Amino acid sequence: MILAKVVGTVVSTQKEMSMEGLKFLVLQQIDLEGNNKGGFVVAADAVDAGIGEIVLYASGSSARQTVKTDKRPCDVVVMAIVDNWEINGEIKYKKGVND
């Protein structure tokens, strides 16, 4: 799983039939300090995340193991919305405080 911030959405009116009903999000990878790193990725949303939220995403075959993406041709999925994280006893992020 990889930490990322939701920075946008993707709308697609023409898509594979099995992808109907999925929301797509644009994610920016972040490091453990909350700084942008790496590139952007488009992910299917399995948890109703919104713009500005910090999320965990998975890719590859793991992306097809959520209820919403089972047996769908997904390569990346948002599978959790992050409430907080802590490193060596120090809270690095807390939802609502660091937003």
Image (tube, rainbow, N blue to C red):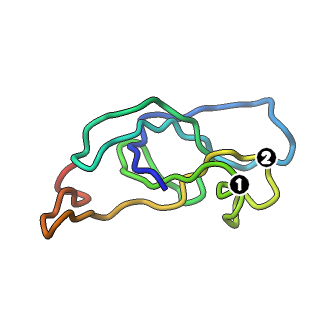
Secondary element type, mark 2:
loop
Name the disc covering residue 61, or none.
1
What's under tag 2, amino acid-wise? Answer: Pro
Q: Where does the image place residue 41, in percent across and percent down from the top left? A: 54, 35
- The reply, left or right, for residue 13 in relation to residue 36 is right
Up-down relation of residue 54 to residue 29 (above or below) = below
Up-down relation of residue 27 to residue 44 (above or below) = above
Name the disc covering residue 10, or none.
none
- The reply, left or right, for residue 86 in relation to residue 48 is left
Q: Residues within 10 Å of mark 2 (few under 14, many from 20)?
A: few
Label 1 near label 2: C-beta < 8 Å?
no
What's under tag 1, amino acid-wise? Answer: Ser
Q: How far is mark 2 from mark 1, CA to CA?
A: 10 Å
Name the disc covering residue 73, or none.
2
Question: Looking at the rendering, which quadrant does residue 37 occupy?
Answer: top left
Q: Residues within 10 Å of mark 1 (few under 14, many from 20)?
A: few
Q: Where does the image place residue 94, in percent across and percent down from the top left? A: 22, 60
Q: Where does the image place residue 77, in percent across and percent down from the top left? A: 60, 51
- The reply, left or right, for residue 70 in relation to residue 10 is right
- The reply, left or right, for residue 21 in relation to residue 46 is right
Give the residue at x 54% y 40%: 25
Q: Looking at this rendering, what residue extends furthest in the bottom direction?
A: 89
Up-down relation of residue 34 to residue 58 (above or below) = above
Q: Where does the image place residue 69, in percent across and percent down from the top left? A: 72, 57
Secondary element type, mark 1:
helix
